[in-house]
Amino acid sequence: MVNYFLMAAMNRLTPLITRHTGPWAAALPMDEHAPFEGADPAAWLQDLKLFATGWLGGLVFFGTLIS
């Protein structure tokens, strides 16, 4: 199934897309840092609790929705 509206909208955006060519087109390596470097333990623990709560909430919600 082809969505002609989406194709027309994306074709109008093509003039805005620029492609960089030449020696600088290659990806440059970046410094790798630890994911929680410089963060106190409470910050990543709060993120973990929020993720776990959301995941369990979604599991309960969709489990009751499907059953």
Image (tube, rainbow, N blue to C red):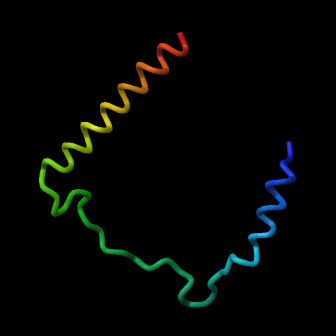
Where in the figure is residue 24, as x and y percent of width and height?
53, 88
What is the quadrant of residue 66 in the picture? top right
Q: Residue at x 84, y 54 (%)?
A: 5
The residue positioned farthest toward the top in the image shown: 67
- From this view, report whether residue 63 is shown above or below residue 7: above
**Picture quadrant of residue 31:** bottom left
Q: In the rendered image, which quarter is residue 46 located in?
A: top left
Q: Residue at x 48, y 13 (%)?
A: 64
Compared across the picture, whether 1 is left or right of 61 comes to right
Report the side of 17 relative to 47 (left or right).
Answer: right
Which x, y percent locates residue 50?
A: 29, 38
Residue 8 place in picture, x, y as percent:
84, 61
Residue at image position (53%, 80%) is: 26
Q: Considering the image in quadrants, where does the N terminus appear? A: top right
Residue drawn at x 47%, y 16% as measured from the top left: 63
**21 shown above or below 62:** below
